[in-house]
Amino acid sequence: MIGQSANPRQGGSVVGTVASVKRIAALTPQLKLVLGAHNIPVAQPSVLPRVVGAIQSVRAGKGEVKPAGAGKAIHSIDGFSFLLHAPQ
């Protein structure tokens, strides 16, 4: 697994997460290192566009989904997993 992201909090939005990651990924050519808040604490900037692709694939219904507690699910694809609201 490359990394995980969590967004289950009340008011959390996958749309907001995608927008945020896209903004950060746009900086990839200028970055030397990604210092993440969790999981892999140090990563190469080249991982950022891959995160964008993975979260967009999850939004499109691709990947594997496993329950992760009340109202939550882990969506996994391409070495990434995202803790999100469970699909309705």
Image (cartoon, rainbow, N blue to C red):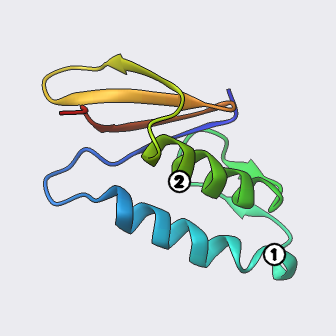
Question: Which quarter of the figure has residue 54?
Answer: top right
Q: Is residue 65 above or below residue 58?
A: above
Q: Position of residue 49 (x, y in %)?
A: 73, 60
Q: Residue at x 80, y 62 (%)?
A: 45
| 32 lies left or right of 20 | right
Quadrant location of the N terminus?
top right
Quadrant location of the C terminus?
top left
Mark 2, residue position: 37
Q: Residues within 10 Å of mark 1 (few under 14, many from 20)?
A: few
Look at label 1 and name its amino acid. Answer: Leu
Q: Residues within 10 Å of mark 2 (few under 14, many from 20)?
A: few
| 33 lies left or right of 36 | right
Q: Residue 31: give its label.
A: 1
Identify the element where label 2 is drawn: loop
Q: Earlier in the sequence, mark 1 or mark 2?
A: 1
Q: Is residue 35 above or below residue 2?
A: below
Q: Residue at x 56, y 66 (%)?
A: 21
Look at label 2 and name its amino acid. Answer: Ala
